Image (tube, grey):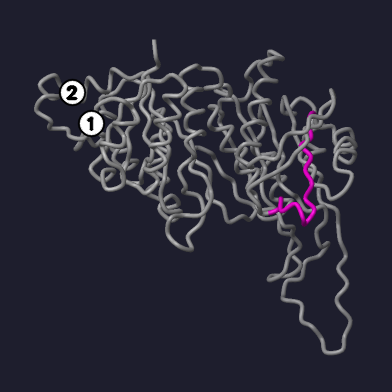
Amino acid sequence: MARRVLLIIGGGIAAYKSLDLIRRLRERGAAVRVVLTRAAQEFVTPLSAGALCNDRVFTDLFDLDDEREIGHIRLSRDADLVVVAPATADLLAKMATGQANDLATAVLLATDKPVLVAPAMNPRMWDHPATRRNVQQLLADGIGFVGPNAGEMAERGEAGVGRMAEAIEIADAVDRLLTGETAGALVGRHVLVTSGPTHEPIDPVRYIANRSSGKQGHAIAAAAAALGARVTLISGPVTLSDPAGVQVVKVETAAQMFAAVNEALPADLAIFAAAVADWRVASAADQKIKKSKGGSPPALALAENTDILRTIAKLGPRRPLLVIGFAAETEAVIEHAQKKRKDKGADWIVANDVSPQTGTFGGDRNTVHLVTADGVTSWEPQSKDAVARLLVQQAADWLAAHKVNVRHGQG
């Protein structure tokens, strides 16, 4: 019997992607029914959606023929999964507060089936405290999320987190939920992730830092949350939005990051993706250092920061079950990563080339090599989101294959 998906299309410009989603779901053998909100009909028509799903499209809560049979209840129960794509800020707010004033929200309130939402909105709307509260409520209610992704918006000059996930990403998430292959693979686990750079102060206005954007670490945290983990993301200074469903601890210095990592333990899985500064200024100035005319540049005495990866990997009983580090290299990438894995005591190292010509720092794509005790696996160049999903899934598989009991998921 074909899997039955009820697709609710919200009123955003990303609605055009939902037409492609219908096609991809049907290619995978799913039967698709579509509900269009009133606003969605400003972007796509019932005719186009109906032609693609090969079924009638539903638009009105007060359709006389349907409601003789309590149509919104029937729609909500006939599906195996309800997908909302795009899920606008307005739809998320209505879902979080239990409203049911149109067909889409009535179906969502009446359904007893899993619900997956693909948010799409302007980055400032996604970052708004009201939206963040609504997302947290929906996560607590058991609603699944796919996306949103980072990128350019429909509005000229607007960019950030808010783009709806691509149709193939949503279709993959539907497959996972319906087959149970990876859904909840990290339920009950506590995953600790570090991300971004650290800023080591020279004086009140200057600091030592690096070019890390935090995109890879934040993507890893989101991927772990998508598999059901309780995630603690310890982030240095970045301009990224907090991933949905993740506890975020914001720090600036390496010392603060190390303290936050210790505070977050114990954990089942720790992924250290942050680019932590190796050194700090031994004595940062209390006031801005002034340049003297004709004088020599000030001498900066450096002190070594605590090596967070090495310290946690060799922690003893409180050591996470699986410890993964990152090696950002500009030459001999694999060789340096292999040495780093042994020196630091990490289980796995994810090595990537961050030479300026690669565009890895600050970019949306990554080319990595997974270094383990068993050897090296080189992955194809792909988006940082895809790298994150693959890495987290392999970590989940490792925990399952080694029959490691859940120890730290609650807290």
Q: Dividing the image into 4 quarters, which one contains the N terminus? A: top left
Identify the residue shown where x is 70% and y is 39%.
262
Residue 351's spot in the image, x, y percent?
Answer: 79, 40
**Which residue is the extreme one toward the top?**
1
Within-10-Å neighbours for mark 1: few <14, some 14–19, many 20+: many
SS for callout 1: strand
The answer to whether marks 1 and 2 mark residues whose Cβ atoms lie closer than 8 Å is yes
Residue 14 placement: quadrant: top left
**Residue at image coords 83%, 89%:** 293
Pointer 1 residue: 58
Percent position of residue 152, x then y: 51, 54
411 falls in the magenta region: no
Give the residue at x 76% y 25%.
317
Q: Please give the residue where the numbered disc 2 appears in the rendered image.
A: 71
Q: Is residue 324 left or right of residue 83?
A: right
Q: Nearer the viewer, residue 188 or 261?
A: 188
Give the label, 1 or 2, closer to the camera. 1
Give the quadrant of the C terminus.
Answer: top right
- In 3D space, how far apart are the residues under numbered discs 1 and 2 (Cα atoms)? 10 Å
Residue type at mark 1: give it.
Answer: Phe
- Specify the farthest residue to the bottom: 293
Amino acid type assigned to the residue bearing label 2 in the image: Gly
Q: Which residues are magenta?
A: 347-361
Residue 170 lies left or right of residue 398; in this view the side is: left
Name the residue nearer the viewer: 117 or 195: 117
Query: Does 306 sit left or right of 64 as displayed?
Result: right
